[in-house]
Image: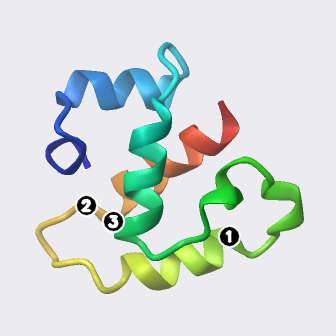
Amino acid sequence: MASFLGVSYQQIHKYESGISHIPLNHIHSISQKFDLDYDIFFEASEHENWENQLSQKITSLPEHISRKRVIKSIRALVDS
């Protein structure tokens, strides 16, 4: 995720832990990468199945990418 967004691993950790807020352009990039509606990051209550949608997209990622880490990062983004 860090290399995809062009940020350091430490910055991703800051996003995950809520120390830093993710810029909108990163949210946009993630939504495009995983073919998700942009608004699910802001209206999670209206999109109860967003994790399922995302999970389906993530399963298509290559094995060398940590799927759990991607999910954790995106969940942190939604919660912040």
Kindly state the secondary structure of the residue where label 1 is placed. helix
Q: Which residue is mark 2?
A: 66
Q: Looking at the image, which is closer to me, 23 or 49?
A: 23
Determine the residue positioned at 63% across, 79% down. 52
Q: Which residue is mark 3?
A: 67
Q: Is residue 13 left or right of residue 38?
A: left
Could you give the CA–CA distance between mark 2 and mark 1, rounded to whole angstroms? Answer: 19 Å
Q: Earlier in the sequence, mark 3 or mark 1?
A: 1
Q: Which residue is mark 1?
A: 50
Amino acid of disc 1 = Trp
Determine the residue positioned at 65% across, 30% down. 80
Determine the residue positioned at 68% across, 38% down. 79
**Do residues under tags 3 and 1 come within 8 Å of each other at their CB atoms?**
no
Q: Looking at the image, which is closer to me, 11 or 32?
A: 32
Work out whether 56 lies above or below 8: below
Instruction: Classify 10 Å Cα crowding around label 3: few (below 14), some (14-19), many (20 and above).
Output: some
Could you give the CA–CA distance between mark 3 and mark 2, rounded to whole angstroms? Answer: 4 Å
**Do residues under tags 3 and 2 come within 8 Å of each other at their CB atoms?**
yes
